[in-house]
Amino acid sequence: MVNGTSPKPPAPLGHGVPPRVRFCPSPTGNPHVGLVRTALFNWAFARHHGGTLVFRIEDTDAARDSEESYQQLLDSMRWLGFDWDEGPEIGGPHAPYRQSQRMDLYRDVAAKLQDAGHAYSCYCTTEELDARRDAARAAGKPSGYDGHCRDLTAEQKAAYEAEGRAPIVRFRMPDEAITFTDLVRGEITVQPENVPDYGIVRANGAPLYTLVNPVDDALMEITHVLRGEDLLSSTPRQIALYRALIELGVAKDVPAFGHLPYVMGEGNKKLSKRDPQASLNLYRERGFLPEGLLNYLSLLGWSIAEDRDIFSRDELVAAFDIADVNANPARFDLKKAEHVNAEHIRMLDVKDFTERCAPWLRAPFANWAPERFDAEKFAEIAPHAQTRVTVLSDITANVDFLFLEEPVEDEASWAKAMKEGSDALLTTARANLAAAGWNAEELKAAVLAAGETHGLKLGKAQAPVRVAVTGRTVGLPLFESMEILGREKTLARIDAALARLTA
């Protein structure tokens, strides 16, 4: 249907006017990462060029839209750090910014299109359409709408209405090819047989997305439409509609279009909003930093440099150019996303890191009684934890040994660390630790000496000590952890482990 050519031209900004872009999600379900990537590229584009970001809510589907999802959208935008220049809670010269509150505008435009001959009433039933499509396919012809009702006489319309048929409204597509320059894919030409007349108003009078989306873009003077590749096939239809709207004085110009590459999930399939890994809430609940997640999502189709993956939002804005977006599908790699997020955690100052950990230090994430939490001890351990965690939710398991009465019982860790001879090693280590000064350096020396006594290197010697003290074979630096836990609790836990080994 479409053919693209390269190389891509630079993004036209037109007449020296700062660009106006829009992000227009539907409030249906939880936001997903593909939606966030679209929002990010629009936001970065607007900020890079000193333009305007319009945040618009496409909530005309009463059966699927919900107020809860609407509030989630607003909350997600705030959490991600996106600011918008026009839209909900801000207003603007083109208010309202919820389509459910703009129905009169759409009805007015639809009537103007019909009066001017750009649209017409179509009385075809679903059964008739299906039969004609089947016949077209059998004859090897395009199976789109065949224009049956394009030129009905008043008598024919009256006859259909006498049968009780309620018409939809179809837009009349031009009979010539449509060519446009996609900001990501280059020049694209679509032949008229591949873009038949299409519906813009349902039989019940409700406007369709095919009408309301371009009408809003026209009325809000959007200059650039940056959206997903899945909407590429609708672009020729919208361009034709824009040209009609310009003729009617509703639109000033046809916007530039750029179609962002698919985000692929597992199995080489497009990442669907139904895929568990697509949910924004999943990453938020796991403790991804918004700046870490956005850094990674920006890499899905764009890069700041060949040899650089980690950068700030300010650096993204300064460097972002829509002409640099790659048209090829981008694969969502969870491990890479975690790596990028971990790097952003390392970049925080310790105070900021400590504050951001707060939600994971209390119920339902924390497994200790609230009164056992010690803010001073957490402040001591935080610098060590910051170098280890990948997402903020990792903090809970890494520091719970400080706030539990006894360490967690991880049977796999116990079985791995407590080998034959571990009781003797722990007995020696316990004696050395009891006599040591209580700081990380002397604690390490005490365990090292215990290992040497039993013919073990430090790595082998500290494993039973770690499990006795923290309950796990992996965690934060052991000797710093023991120093912060304190002499009394550390020795008591080693005693408890020895009692279990010798029972």
Image (spheres, helix red, strand yellow):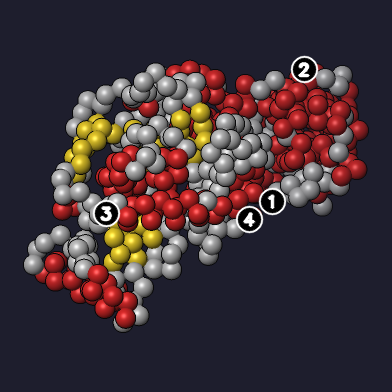
Distance between the Cα atoms at labels 4 and 1? 46 Å
Determine whether label 3 and label 4 are within 8 Å by CB: no
Residue type marked 4: Glu
Q: Position of residue 23 (x, y in %)?
A: 49, 39
**Residue plotted at (27% across, 72% down):** 157
Query: Which residue is labeled 3 in the image?
Result: 117
Query: Which residue is labeled 2 in the image?
Result: 441
Neighbour tally class for label 3: few under 14, some 14-19, many 20 plus, Cα within 10 Å: few
The image quarter in which residue 465 lies: top right
Distance between the Cα atoms at labels 3 and 4? 38 Å
Q: Position of residue 326 (x, y in %)?
A: 32, 31
The label on residue 411 is 1
Q: Secondary structure at mark 4?
A: helix
Q: Nearer the viewer, mark 3 or mark 1?
A: 3
**Residue plotted at (16% across, 43% down):** 177
Residue type marked 1: Glu
Q: Nearer the viewer, mark 3 or mark 4?
A: 3
Residue type marked 3: Gly
Of the two numbered discs 3 and 1 on the same chain, state the one appearing first in sequence.
3
Distance between the Cα atoms at labels 4 and 2? 57 Å
Q: Is 115 displayed left or right of 476 in the figure?
A: left
Residue type marked 2: Glu
Q: Secondary structure at mark 1?
A: helix
Neighbour tally class for label 1: few under 14, some 14-19, many 20 plus, Cα within 10 Å: few
